[in-house]
């Protein structure tokens, strides 16, 4: 490093230097790919330790990927399928499984097809991964916040002042904007051109519950339900919160719900509290005279849990006039807005495809590559998020290595 605080570009015959900004799954995979190819790699991140979001995700088992056939797997990325397909085909779920097992972390496939480490947490995998990276000579520099470019050099804010680097190639792996307290705060979006607004994905939605329902049932699970919106129906589970509803079935529809609310304002989501029971059978149980039976006990005959009974009662108090069986099969939930990025599992938006070439290199920044959740794609939960982050990280790392060696 010279007196100006800048590290000079490598001289002829030396290893190429690759800088990776961001120490999440995509960034660490980019670092591994470049270092395995012989590059001297430095990873810089503004957080005190790497992969914090990965560790939090691991508390629920760390869903690495999914075992469904690749064509169906790729279709989960919707509008991003064509963009992501080459990277995932080059590093498919089978390769990710082999990679994890190569770190001494055997995996298993659950009944849903989701793939997890047998340890059911992220920390053993991350420890083994960091040890591998250290063995490859990868340097990890925490508490370095990227501030963009100054006179052509990468500029970082550190505890010791400003650090400027001029690597042969750079990989940006800065994450999206969900769970910002874990590091992915989206601050990088102001430093780049062509960034689609970052929005919550795989998120819950706000509903104005009555005070009695909120006080009694916040945190209550809705099990074995179905949700329907714009002709798409998803079975699964959800959870009532003080301010709305969240959970796997909600997340599966969150993209369409978010965009509809942005276009039209509040929308109606249909909740089927008994998707396993045909409408005719439910009508026979519920739509006749109740006699002296209370409404709650009458609904209990249809197998509704207390939270389901409360939701039907809430709809009736709000003026719903449909027969009880129809309310149970299609209870209207008025979604006012998506929950904020601070509660979202992932984010939509990011660096637009048009800003990168087929190597994931920024068109206006030769030698700078981007990967992971900072790209403009989204996917449902189920292993698809991590798979795309790993695959694009690997692709960007290999492309950065090739650029540094050109």
Image: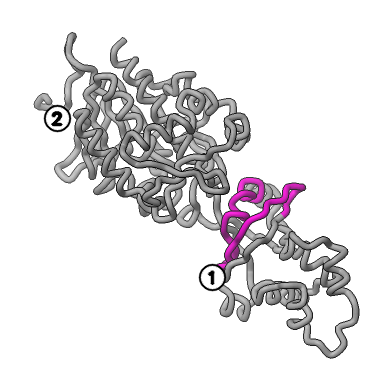
Residue 9 or 298: which is nearer the viewer? 298
Q: In the image, residue 132 lies at what x, y percent?
A: 25, 34
Against 364, residue 289 (above or below) is: below
Residue assigned mark 1: 219
Q: In the image, residue 155 lies at what x, y percent?
A: 26, 33
Residue 362 or 130: which is nearer the viewer? 130
Image quarter of residue 36: top left
Which image quadrant: the N terminus?
top left
Q: Residue at x 57, y 71 (%)?
A: 220
Residue placed furthest toward the right: 288
Image quarter of residue 22: top left
Q: In the image, residue 238 lies at what x, y percent?
A: 60, 61
Callout 2 environment at 10 Å: few (<14), some (14 to 19), or many (20+)? few
Q: Would residue 120 appear left or right of 70 to someone viewing this image? A: left
Q: Would residue 8 appear left or right of 168 to someone viewing this image? A: left
Against 81, residue 406 (above or below) is: above
Q: Nearer the viewer, mark 1 or mark 2?
A: 1
**Callout 2 secondary element:** loop
Residue assigned mark 2: 5
Q: Is residue 53 visible?
A: no
Q: Indicate whether residue 334 is drawn in magenta.
A: no
Against 51, residue 82 (above or below) is: above
Q: Residue at x 39, y 46 (%)?
A: 184
Marks 1 and 2 sit apart, C-alpha to C-alpha, by 53 Å
Q: How is the image coloured?
A: one colour
Boundaries of the magenta span: 228-257
């Amino acid at each position: 490093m010279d007196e100006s605080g800048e590290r000079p570009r490598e001289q002829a015959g030396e290893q190429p230097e690759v800088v990776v900004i961001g120490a999440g799954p995509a960034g660490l995979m980019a670092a591994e790919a470049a270092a395995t190819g012989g590059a001297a790699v430095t990873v810089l991140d503004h957080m005190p330790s790497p992969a914090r979001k990965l560790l939090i995700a691991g508390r629920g088992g760390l869903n690495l990927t999914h075992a469904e056939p690749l064509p169906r797997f790729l279709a989960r990325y919707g509008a991003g399928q064509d963009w992501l397909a080459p990277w995932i085909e080059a590093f498919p779920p089978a390769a990710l499984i082999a990679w994890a097992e190569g770190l001494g972390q055997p995996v298993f496939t659950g009944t849903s097809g989701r793939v997890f480490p047998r340890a059911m947490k992220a920390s053993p995998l991350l420890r083994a991964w960091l040890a591998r990276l250290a063995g490859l000579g990868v340097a990890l520099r925490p508490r370095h916040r990227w501030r963009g470019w100054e006179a052509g050099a990468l500029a970082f804010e550190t505890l010791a002042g400003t650090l400027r680097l001029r690597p042969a190639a750079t990989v940006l792996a800065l994450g999206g904007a969900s769970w910002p307290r874990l590091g992915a705060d989206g601050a990088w979006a102001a430093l780049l051109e062509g960034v689609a607004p970052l929005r919550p994905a795989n998120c819950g939605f706000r509903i104005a519950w009555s005070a009695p329902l909120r006080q009694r049932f916040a945190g209550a699970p809705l099990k074995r339900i179905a949700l329907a919106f714009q002709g798409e129906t998803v079975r699964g589970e959800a959870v009532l919160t003080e301010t709305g509803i969240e959970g796997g079935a909600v997340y599966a529809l969150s993209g369409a719900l978010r965009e509809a609310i942005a276009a039209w304002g509040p929308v109606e989501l249909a909740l089927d509290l008994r998707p396993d029971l045909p409408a005719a059978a439910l009508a026979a149980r519920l739509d006749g005279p109740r006699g002296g039976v209370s409404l709650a006990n009458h609904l209990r005959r249809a197998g509704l849990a207390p939270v389901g009974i409360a939701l039907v009662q809430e709809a009736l108090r709000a003026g719903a006039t449909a027969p009880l069986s129809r309310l149970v099969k299609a209870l209207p939930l008025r979604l006012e807005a998506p929950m904020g990025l601070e509660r979202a599992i992932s984010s939509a938006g990011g660096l637009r495809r048009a800003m990168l070439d087929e190597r994931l290199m920024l068109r206006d920044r030769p030698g700078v590559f981007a990967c992971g959740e900072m790209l403009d794609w989204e996917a449902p939960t189920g292993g698809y998020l991590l798979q795309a982050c790993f695959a694009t990280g690997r692709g960007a790392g290999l492309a950065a290595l090739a650029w540094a060696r050109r």
